Amino acid sequence: MTLFLESVGRRRFVVVWVVLASSCSDSTGPSREISADGAVTTFDADVADAQEPNVDSSSEDAAGDFCNGPPDLYIDADCSVLNPSILAYSPRFWLWSDGTGKERFISFPEGSQIDTREADHWVFPVGTRIWKTFSYQGARVETRYFEKTTSGTGVNHWDFRTYRWDGPSEANEVPFGGEENALGTPHDIPSLAQCVECHSEYGPRDMVLGFGAVQLNHDRSETTLQDLRDLGMLSHDIPTELAAIPGMEHTQQALGYLHANCGHCHSADESAPEGLRLWVPVGLATEQQAPAYLTAIEVDSEWRTLVDGSIEANQRIVPRRPDISTLYLRTGIRGEDQMPPLGSEIVDADGRTNLFLWISGLETTQ
């Protein structure tokens, strides 16, 4: 294990790089061994392998001193002290998940870099691990865990797992997911098929959402785009000014909402469903260059409806008329025609407000 102290901006924090494997050793002190069920055993690497683990002999369960939770995320029995090898982060724009709180964490193998040759399609090194914990009314409900196991991009190179928090310090794997109203909350644990549906095909080629140039380009994240640049984690530099969303604040918020909530399917690629592209790419000079402007404003909609029983809403975005813009209307529906189609049973009122303000201020292009 190698320890680096880094000073980034006004913050000074510790980054500990580890080789990510089922057994992590240190030639000068205690190490941890993680079993398949997430239990952690501490042992002294200087002692012969045959020796029993270095634990209190009065304890009947050595693993009881550690968090019984997602692999290697916490290092104490109460599941409250984050493993110092792990970086916390927060995207600028959140994917709406019915008002649940979220904590996000990531770790990388020692000496690795993210392949950023394509600024919108980061490729992560083998051994990258990502955790996302969902909480409801202050209590943890679920943690999702991704680990990149082989080189390449796409679903076949990642291991997906999900854990349900059955107590403050106990999280158990739900092997296939697909649990509605977990622990009596409105939060649903998705099936593995649903995970793949959102994390593949149209979005970033290497599955990861929320950890990219646009999403990390803000100062309210524990780990920012500038931090990654300073740490030498990017194979190709991405200046922060290129990852900025142009326009007034309400425009940035609306485009960011679409980016986070819709862009993983309606990506910046030409293959996006129905040609609707809502991902915000790196390098925009003006907001009018955003794919949402080019593919949604005054563009006919495949989905149509009557408003007030008489006016047909038939365009994705009608400038100054959110009330007849199908993109806006579908964000207010829950059921068969809702958008996004997965992961939500409650309308995102704040997100719709941002869309309303943006559409209301648009000028017609005709």
Image (cartoon, grey):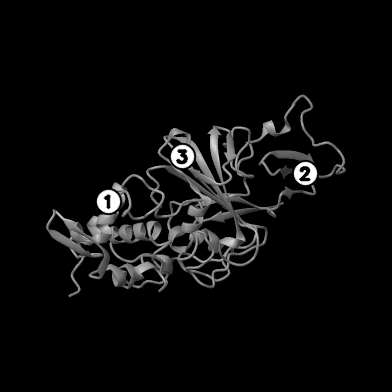
Q: Label 2 neighbourhood size at 10 Å, few (<14), some (14-19), many (20+)?
A: few
Q: Residue furthest top?
A: 58
Q: Label 1 neighbourhood size at 10 Å, few (<14), some (14-19), many (20+)?
A: some
Q: Which amino acid lies under the numbered mark 2 shown in the image of this protein? A: Gly
* 304 or 292, nearer to the observer: 304
Q: Is residue 324 left or right of residue 64?
A: left
Q: Position of residue 169 (x, y in %)?
A: 58, 33
Question: Label for residue 332?
Answer: 1
Q: Are marks 1 and 2 in contact (CB under 8 Å)?
A: no
Question: Can the viewer see residue 355?
Answer: no
Q: Position of residue 166 (x, y in %)?
A: 54, 33
Question: Label for residue 29?
Answer: 2
Q: Is residue 7 left or right of residue 100?
A: right
Cα distance between the residues tagged 3 and 2: 35 Å
* 39 or 138, nearer to the observer: 39
Above or below, 283 relative to 352: below
Residue at 42%, 66% in the rendered image:
243
Callout in the foreground (3, 2): 3
Above or below, 31 relative to 147: above
Question: Label for residue 135?
Answer: 3
